[in-house]
Image (spheres, rainbow, N blue to C red):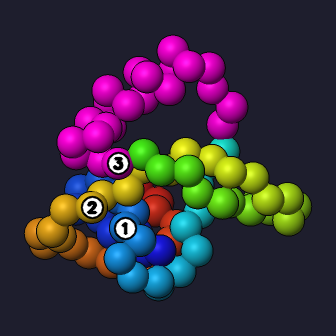
Amino acid sequence: MAMYSGGIPFVTDREQVSRIHGELFSVDADTLRGTDRVEGHPVHYTRRLTKVRTHDGEEHEAWLYFYDHELVYPHLVPTGSYIY
């Protein structure tokens, strides 16, 4: 996967650049629907189940939002860790 920033970070799986660093949350269905609205799923970002690994090595399946559109003025975040 690759992380880019165009003012906000976004992830694409069109290329393999680095691991993506983030936070893992457990949410209920209402919260997930609200997050979908904020992220513009499925029009702007697409939510897909993705295998993730926590710092202690545990593997989980988690929802991750992907940007599947053409990249305009992207700035690669080579570390996969967005800090603003």
Badge 1, how many Cα within 10 Å: few under 14, some, many 20+? some
Q: Does the segment drawn in magenta span residue 20?
A: no
Q: Residue at x 30, y 58 (%)?
A: 67
Q: Position of residue 58 (x, y in %)?
A: 85, 59
Q: Amino acid at mark 1?
A: Thr
Residues marked 1 and 3 touching at CB (< 8 Å): no
Q: Amino acid at mark 3?
A: Thr
Residues marked 1 and 2 touching at CB (< 8 Å): yes
Sequence-wise, the earlier of marks 1 and 2 is 1
Location of mark 2 (residue): 68
Q: Residue at x 68, y 51 (%)?
A: 61
Q: Quadrant of the C terminus?
A: bottom left
Sequence-wise, the earlier of marks 1 and 3 is 1
Q: Position of residue 19 (x, y in %)?
A: 58, 74
Cα distance, mark 3 to mark 2? 7 Å
Q: How many marks?
A: 3
Q: Position of residue 63 (x, y in %)?
A: 55, 45
Describe the element under mark 3 as helix, strand or loop. strand
Location of mark 1 (residue): 12
The magenta span reads 25-46
Location of mark 3 (residue): 46
Cα distance, mark 1 to mark 3? 10 Å
Q: Nearer the viewer, residue 79 or 18?
A: 18
Residues marked 3 and 2 touching at CB (< 8 Å): yes
Instruction: Give above or below for 41 relative to 80.
Output: above
The answer to whether residue 22 is seen in the rendering is: yes
Q: Nearer the viewer, residue 38 or 63?
A: 63
- The reply, left or right, for residue 36 in relation to residue 6 is right
